[in-house]
Amino acid sequence: MNILALSTSHCSSAALMIDGVLVGMIQEERLTKRKNQVALPLRSAEALVDRHLGGDRSRIDQVIFGGRRDSPYWVALDHYSAYSVADQVREMHEFWYPHFYGDGADPDEYWLSQIAAGRNLNPDHNFDFSFLGTLRGEKVLEHFNEVERPAAVARWLGRDTSCVMIDHHKCHGYWALYGSAKPCDDLEQVLVVTADAMGDTSNWSVSVAHSDGTLELIAHGLDHDVARIYKFVTLILGMKPNEHEYKVMGLAPYSRSSGHIEAVERVFDEILDFREGRFVSDRPLTDRYFNLKERLEGHRFDNIAAGLQNWTTRITQSWLRHWIIETGRPFVCFSGGLAMNIRTNGHLLEMPEISGLSVSASGGDESLPGGACYAHWAETVGPLEPAPHVYLGDTAEPIENWEHAVEEAGGDPTLFAGRSGIDAQSVAQLLAADNVVARCVGPAEFGARALGNRSILANPSNPDNVKFINDAIKNRDFWMPFTPSILVEYADDYLENPKGVQSPYMTIGFSSQPERRHEIIGGLHPSDFSARPQFIRFDQNPEYWTLVDEFRQLTGIPAVMNTSLNLHGEPMNYTSHDALRTLVLSELDFLILPGDKLVYRRRAERKLDIALRNRVASAG
């Protein structure tokens, strides 16, 4: 059976399952080049059908939507991709303030006025929105989700089809169970939890796994407001909600003023706490922007970030502790937008009630189609295995005429050169000589994290590499850390991991071992030396494992510094052409392409020759 699953939510994506095996999953943003693209993800679907079904759409047996309810207005207006911080603040004042404190703004009229004004229109949504303006209220949502979404799929397929719609948090739950390595041998010990800002009228769920691989929902609700509050604090701090929450998380460790942090925590504690098995509020918010901003007035930005992060961790721990005790299940699988908070995930491991933790790859809404595939198969067909890896995108294409691609990107080909035969040992030699090297090789990784195939790599022991990558390529905020990609065989030498959990997808934070942290300092948080590591396993990515092992043999360090291959504000690179464009438009010197091909700036030729001479010398 061939199952195609689609998401029309934040960072839309498509997944393809063939006979119970997830063979591909692609985010639409990688193909439209619009970060967090929301759409009917037909480009992704087309790529999956071309790659795995010979381009024959008739071979699709079942189409599934991951999630039952999305807003057509937010799709038409490109709310997730195009809205700036200023746009978000304007919306707060134009619509939400009157909605909460005035006569009550009419939602349909407001969103239709934005569309009529041509503000931030989405050019890549793939829907027929002619019904907008003809319906009102709940009927708009019903028509979009139950009529137009299936109709748009039918138009693409060229035939009528019945689409299955699976609950948002059920998708998150099944992705929590199957979107990482097998959690443990006894599924009857597994507790599956999900949490986010909201999806399909819930923002949390708790399920138990059964030995047949299915989940049983035992509780859910709309009162776990942590992720939603985190979202609005992000906006209050002048950053983009639904995208920059990780920046607030990264800012949190810089504040060391415990008294000021505790004062902020008290603000959040009044808003929401978890006591005696339920979420409670001693002083509820009247809205999540204006009233929250008023309560935080006078508190410094770093203390707000730290207090918010501490409160997030404490609430999540209390919530999980209750359900672990209630169910007697100590092994936790976690997904949903809140599961992207790697700092909280790391602190969950401190709980004595937790025996193990599995946090799936990229647990935001981009993974809904993967969870939808697993949910449908498990509940209608039978048992299946977890995803062995998430290198689920198209394979980077070899480029013979790289000069043409450089010209297309606006570059001068005479400033660049190419060299063949640059194998893993050669790349390791470049890295060991403190050169920064981009790598676009093999199938693209799915999700928010670069896992070596669309990555910028550097020697982790040299902190100067952090500044170079930030200044010359990424333009990242100075406080944000990079990642150590570390061979799983050596992870315990560098990271504190007493419960032996696996973190192949950068989803859990760890403290570093003090005596070894200088070797991977470039991949650690600058303030508290914590890490959000990728454990590299040979069976998941043998080529990347081999590259890092070659670096280990040269330097004694079984890790490299890793960040995603892209320009600031753009989606992660997907194709070799994307990578060449990044090379041209940044100050990168070296780019590895398929077939052991290196394209580099001629100004860096001496660096290359020195590195390769060192290889010959070390071999001799």
Image (cartoon, rainbow, N blue to C red):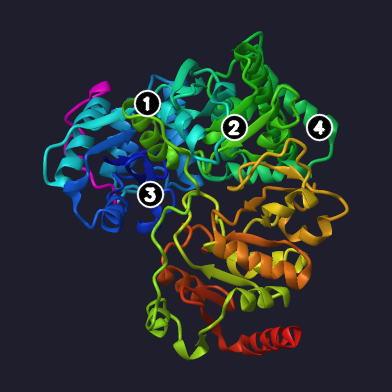
Q: Position of residue 194 (x, y in %)?
A: 52, 27
Cβ–Cβ under 8 Å for marks 2 and 3? no
Q: How many marks?
A: 4
| CA distance for labels 1 and 3 | 22 Å
Considering the numbered disc 1 on the image, is that residue within a helix, a strand or a loop? loop
Q: Residues within 10 Å of mark 3 (few under 14, many from 20)?
A: some
Report the residue that reaches farthest toward the left: 159
Q: Amino acid at mark 2?
A: Cys
Judge by depth and name the residue closer to the eye, 461 or 23.
23
Q: Residue at x 48, y 91 (%)?
A: 414
Is 585 placed left or right of 112 in the picture? Answer: right
Q: Earlier in the sequence, mark 1 or mark 3?
A: 3
Q: Earlier in the sequence, mark 2 or mark 4?
A: 2
Report the residue that reaches farthest toward the right: 515
Q: Would you place residue 479 above or below residue 434 in this image?
A: above
| CA distance for labels 2 and 4 | 41 Å
Numbered mark located on residue 184 in the image: 2
Q: Residues within 10 Å of mark 4 (few under 14, many from 20)?
A: some
Q: Amino acid at mark 4?
A: His
Q: Nearer the viewer, mark 3 or mark 4?
A: 3
Residue 290 seen in the figure: yes
| CA distance for labels 3 and 4 | 49 Å
Q: Position of residue 308 (x, y in %)?
A: 68, 32
Residue 479 seen in the figure: no
Q: Residue at x 66, y 29 (%)?
A: 312
Cβ–Cβ under 8 Å for marks 1 and 3? no
Residue under label 4:
260
Q: Main secondary structure of the magenta part?
A: loop
Q: Would you place residue 480 above or below residue 133 in this image?
A: below
Numbered mark located on residue 23 in the image: 3
